[in-house]
Amino acid sequence: MNSGGGSGSDRMKEDEKSTTTKQIGPQFIPKLKGKKVIIRLVNGGQPITGILEGYNAYEILIQTAKEQILVFKHAIAVIEPVDMPKQVFTQSE
């Protein structure tokens, strides 16, 4: 009886290892840090234009002309760089 539970437990530990590996997000956001961007949200409305000051796994911090705005990544439809050549994003590193 114990041997069956042990193998299931071992299998679960292997599954946990595979799901706890670090996920690699989009590699273009670090290239935009300190650059002017336009962010369009999934709910529409006014686009947000400003300098991308920082980011983490869930949020992006934008410095606009008036204030800092914290935008949740899941609410973003499009991030458009302003005045940046497209080659910056198409070159593989």
Image (spheres, rainbow, N blue to C red):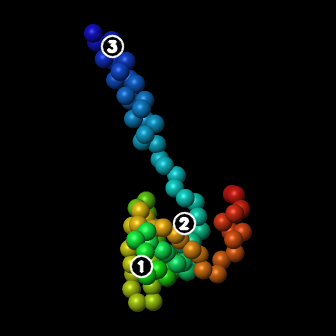
Residue at 39 percent of width and 86 percent of height: 67
Q: Residues within 10 Å of mark 1 (few under 14, many from 20)?
A: few
Q: Quadrant of the C terminus?
A: bottom right
**Image coords of residue 6 (percent x, y):** 33, 18
- Element at badge 2? helix
Tell me if label 1 and label 2 are in contact, CB under 8 Å: no
Q: Secondary structure at mark 3?
A: helix
For mark 3, what is the residue? 4
Asked whether the viewer can see residue 61, the reply is no
Of labels 3 and 1, earlier in sequence is 3
User: Residue 56: percent from the left, percent from the top?
Assistant: 43, 63
Quadrant of residue 45 within the rendered picture: bottom left
The amino acid type, in three-letter code, at marker 1 is Gly
**Amino acid at circle 3:** Gly
Which residue matches tag 2? 29
**Is 21 drawn above or below residue 26 in the view shown?**
above
**Badge 1 is on which residue?**
45
Label 1 vs label 2: CA separation?
22 Å
Q: Is residue 71 above or below residue 51?
A: above
Q: Tag 3: Cα neighbours inside 10 Å, few (<14), some, or many (≥20)?
A: few
Q: From mark 2 to mark 3, how far is it between C-alphas? A: 47 Å
Eye-nearest disc, 1 or 2: 1
Type of amino acid at the residue the image marks with label 2: Ile
Q: What is the tally of numbered marks visible in this picture?
A: 3
